[in-house]
Amino acid sequence: MQIVIIGGGISAAYIANRIKEIAMEADVQIISDESLAPYDRIHLCNLVNEEDTQKDISLALHPSVKVTLNQKVAQIDRENKKVRTADHTYGYDKLIIATGSIPKTLFDIEDLDNAGVFRSADDSQKIKEGIKGREVVIVGSGPLALELLETLNAMEDAKHITLLVRSNRLYAHSLSSEAQNEIESAYLKSGKVRISYENEIVDKTIIEGHITQLKTKKFEIDDPYLIFGVGIQPNIDFSRESLECNRGILTNDFMQTSDEDIYAVGEAAEVKSLGFIAGHVKECTLQADVALSDLFGSEEKRFRPEVSVDMLKVGEFDLIDVSSPERSKENAFEKIVMTSPNDHRVDEYYIKDDKLIRFIGINSNVDVGYLEDLVRDQNPIDASYLYENRVLSERGRLICSCEHVYQKDLEDIVRMSGVSNFQELGEFTQAGRVCGRCKKMVVDVVEASQGLIDPNMPKKTPEDLKREKEIELARKRVEKFNRLHPQNQLDSDNLSSAMDAYDITDQEMNRWVSMVTADMQLHPEFEELVKKGVRTLNRVPVIWLELADCSGNSEAFIKTADPSIADLIFDYISLDYHELLMSSAGDQSETVLEHIISHQKGEYILIVEGAIPLGMDGKFLRIGPQGQTGLELLKQCAEDAALIISVGACAFDGGVVAAAPNPTGAVGVSEALGREDVINLPGCPVNPINIVGTLLYYLMFEELPKLDSFHRPLWAYEGRIHDNCERRGHYELGEFVKEWGDEGAKKGWCLFEMGCKGPYANANCPTMKFNQGTSWPVQGGHGCMGCVETKFFDRLATERKVEEEK
């Protein structure tokens, strides 16, 4: 696929790299009208004061992405799928427009040597040279103008600076006088800045491409260097004849233009249904992800603007602006201002219909994440609530608004991992790398935090830190269960005594724990926690229901030749309710069940074995002295269960009980309950290890393991039986058993020709096996029947090859 991207900024580079992550084989071409490869415009001030070089602000691109510079697009030929410049033509299959915006000016300055804008690296170079020996005049008071003012204020070459402000406020016309004073005083301290409010250019004298004099309402300035910072507009003139445009190129919610093969993102795009044009890097990258999801058909994403966070960091103050995407009508609000003169702090809350729509803070110590939640959730609030719940962030100063990373977050990463520089930090967080505005602050925090590192600690990877955090959370979770089941008097000493009675050594137990840990696809460092979790299983309240089945799964746990660790674990679980294994009977057993359901809501685990007949209103199966149907009992027990696990093929989808013609109308647990949160552990029977592992996973992590489309745990059902079968080598060599008892059967050849369904079934049977890892059906000489798959009895439980069946 040939994908052409028009533009040379952050959005274009982001899109190009994401395409290579999604579809490495795609041919990606960037066309830019600039002379420099894509770079980060956020750091243009660093080019003006020479803190950075052009190389420092360059954006990383995948090496296979083609970049063509100095090519200004003149036309898009939709019919022939061509992009035309003055001297080149580029073909495309898909076109993405990410041309950003261009700055506005109050008059034509293209041929003037002492006037410019501030939007590109060339503009930065022109400003750096042009300010020498001249009074600098900046028109505008938005974030970009104020940031440039801060930079020039600190440069010796800028001797005097005038900021022309058309209104009577800096940054935003709604800003309070208290906030205004804090910002203004920060700039005026140097003595070389004057801020002129309610002032504007009224005339000018230009001689041979040079402004010799500017006249404003209040001043006359000779030989100035003029910089416009009065706003931007979408850079889309080349597309107006070929695409539907308004202020920007109009798109649908998937960032698709009026041509289905052309997308537009960022400041060049206007989402038609919202009338929305992006103004932040985060919004641009979000739109890029939406466009690529639609282009590659990976998932349906619609663009919806999120709460935005702007930050202006200068020497004397920090400004935080948290805004709702719905705050378009700023004149319809009430404002609450809270000030702290000693701290030079001003917090402004903008309220509409009793909901927070915006917050502007000067040197604020309110947790920005807390404010985002208030704006996003749009719950009604009142003034006293805002005052009494001014949450101070325990994480310190917000450093990166794009990634919501605070100072303490960075310090913790450095302390726990041993990161020594900004480059190494990239493995752990994208702070300083999204829009790049906070990069210097991130670097400073990393450097200042080096003293927190233990010199004897080895460096750690993000995976190491993630695993340590998971282990710690799981450990707390396991310890919680020691208090969860007070009526069970068993403790870990009971398990140790039972192990001694069965002659099971610690070494055997450790091997078993290692096996379970590995099968659950956990890192070996989890072994101690798994072992501790096993000793806590007796604290988990468990109800085990047997419905329409043969008791095969329950029998599998108790009918072994010798007591095994798995048997012992299931004894140790001490099931609260199980018709086959519990000591209580009749009314007494019903009392136990009712007590659990009534007094341990949301705490007990429900394990269901067997199918649920739905025919005759469920009357094919009646249970207990009250004659409840299986369906009624299931629903009663499932309503307040913390977790529901179906074990065996019958509980999965009806299994053998639901085989054609299925006269009882039997179905699986999930279908009977109409729920999608049931964990399925199919098998005929299920391997006991899969039940233990699932219980342990829930015990340690308090969440469901990753599941496949049939809600089976991936750690147990992801691997294909065929791929892990010990007979796979014979399959590759074409060595098959042709008849039972033939030479191939004696030599252990592949059973595929005898109807083995291993290639069509996913489970861990070949690796975990049964009866203490002794064997499994294929090793014993019988082909797999695919009993872990849907409708296996009708589809797979034969000695015929699948392709021979209709």
Image: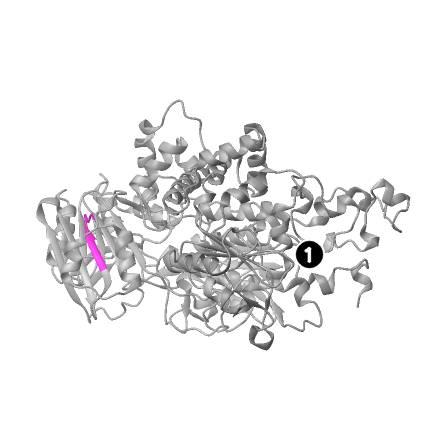
1 or 233, which is in the foreground? 1
- Against 405, is 33 above or below? below
Rendering coords of residue 416 (x, y %) = 38, 33
Q: Is residue 225 visible?
A: no
Q: Magenta residues, as a range? A: 359-365
How many tags in the picture?
Answer: 1
103 or 442, which is in the foreground? 442
At horizontal 45% and vertical 46% (from top left) the residue drawn is 699
787 or 614, which is in the foreground? 614
Q: How is the image coloured?
A: one colour
**Tag 1, which secondary structure?**
loop
Q: Hey, which residue is sitting farthest right in the picture?
A: 743
Rendering quarter of residue 671? bottom right
Amino acid type at circle 1 is Cys
The N terminus lies in quadrant: bottom right
Rendering coords of residue 579 (x, y %) = 54, 56
- Against 640, is 494 above or below? above
Q: Hey, which residue is sitting farthest left in the picture?
A: 341
At horizontal 83% and vertical 54% (from top left) the residue drawn is 754
Q: Hey, which residue is sitting farthest top in the picture?
A: 456
User: How crowded is the residue under tag 1: few (<14 C-alpha within 10 Å), some, or many (20+)?
Assistant: many
Q: Is residue 23 visible?
A: yes
Rendering coords of residue 572 (x, y %) = 50, 42
Is residue 99 found inside the magenta-colored segment of the image? no
Name the residue beneath numbered marker 1: 787
The C terminus lies in quadrant: bottom right
